[in-house]
Image: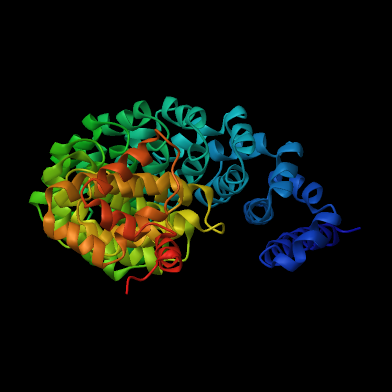
Amino acid sequence: MSQRQVLQVFEQYQRARTQFVQAVAELATRPQNIETLQNAGVMALLRPLLLDVVPTIQQTSALALGRLANYNDDLAEAVVKGDILPQLVYSLEEQNRFYKKAAAFVLRAVAKHSAKLAQSIVDCGAVDALVKCLEDFDPGVKEAAVWALGYIARHNAELSQAVVDAGAVPLLVLSIQEPEIALKRIAASALSDLSKHSPELAQTVVDAGAIAHLAQMILNPDAKLKRQVLSALSQIAKHSVDLAEMVVEAEIFPVVLTCLKDSDEYVKKNSATLIREIARHTPELSQLIVNTGGVAAVIDYVGNTSGNVRLPGIMMLGYVAAHSENLAMAVIISKGVPQLAICLSEEAEDHIKAAAAWSLGQIGRHTPEHARAVAVANVLPKLLSLYMDTDSSEDLQVKAKKALKNILQKCTHLPALEPLLHDAPPNILKHVVGQFSKVLPHDSKARRLFVTSGGLKKIQEITADPGSPLQEYINTINNCYPEEIVRYYSPGYSQTLLERVDHYQPVF
């Protein structure tokens, strides 16, 4: 065989390998092909091609493996069991930028499925290699490495700590300062994933100077970047008062309020989440939000959104109101109660209704004035209905009951309480009757109205155990009226009168 023929054989072999990996990479983009590829043992065929002498074959085989591993955890597990990871880690340090991107993609695809698979990435030494890629001159390599590190970190604190220990955080903070928008996005996302697990991890991110750079990007025109920036700041602020104050000190107010009106749903939601995480910590932080117009802005936000996008706004109002009478009044003055009442009525998901119930309870629990503001919005019958509805989730029933009790124990606006006399079960009824027993002895106009509206008649129909608090409340109410009025409205009194007619002997 001549030298030319030998070369032709090698060329055919190279062409065949190239065609094979390209075909597999293409087939792996379509879900309907995955099972067939898996059954054909494609993993075992791709592994040796990672070591091929031809760089394009190496890169394309890595790309194919990444697409397969990305599809489900079984295929990702096959990558781990196929002893492919060590070769990828080696390649991250030794190969060209195209291969580095492909190798990082495989590591990310494996890590995303579960903490166990992400731990496999850590165990094979990939984190150190990925961190070295953050210093690469090529933005695409940096982006691929950041993405993989973020997917490792998102699962739990231990995996996040492994990323931190490898020295990733300062390089991630540098990455958000790079000009490439895609790199900024994914770096902000990775910082968010690192920060979310514990105050210590969030503090590490803060110590690297992340807050100032993130805060500067709140008004970046790129919606996807804003999503990640707001998420990262939320994950930092949620852990402690100190961290929340550091976020606020970066002068995010009132700038962040403009994001509540953003056209992107996720930007809006993440902005509301950030404001919620800050508000929940202390009255002082909530007051700062009130002072910058934050409560009014969030109430508008709640009115203009629905479903889960609405949820952080609903909860933020509850957190603000929970801190003090003045802050709850700020929510009332800004017309927060009608908006929360709408949420309670129109939302379909129980967890959102539960949040609205909780927030209304926080607003109404302070003073009779607060309770009246909630009661006149016709919230009490709705809360009672949700509590008694067997289709309501357990959490919704608990939140509705607690809110009802919180509001009822302060409510002296009797017209709002009266409908509950007819519908409330005994455990709620005692709180309703208790409020009547507090108000009626001191209000003659209310006593007259209570008779004409049928309230006194309803009180006489209630069966209470002798000596119980409910019986005491009923006795107090009855003592507000002449004995003949109470007797007149008592059950069976009309029958007693008729019997007296039967036995009455006319005098002629």
Frontmost residue, 143 versus 485: 485
Quadrant that contains the C terminus: bottom left
Residue 7, horizontal then vertical, whole percent: 79, 58
Frontmost residue, 261 versus 410: 410
**Residue 481, above or below 471:** below
Q: Is residue 415 left or right of residue 353?
A: left
Quadrant that contains the N terminus: bottom right
Identified at 47% across, 50% down, the residue is: 397
Identified at 76% across, 58% down, the residue is: 17
Q: Is residue 367 left or right of residue 98?
A: left
Q: Is residue 56 left or right of residue 488?
A: right
**Residue 119, above or below 366:** above
Colour option used: rainbow
User: Is residue 175 something that shows in the picture?
Assistant: no
**Residue 367, above or below 413:** above
Residue 439, horizontal then vertical, whole percent: 18, 48
In the current view of this chain or complex, which residue is farthest to the bottom?
Answer: 508
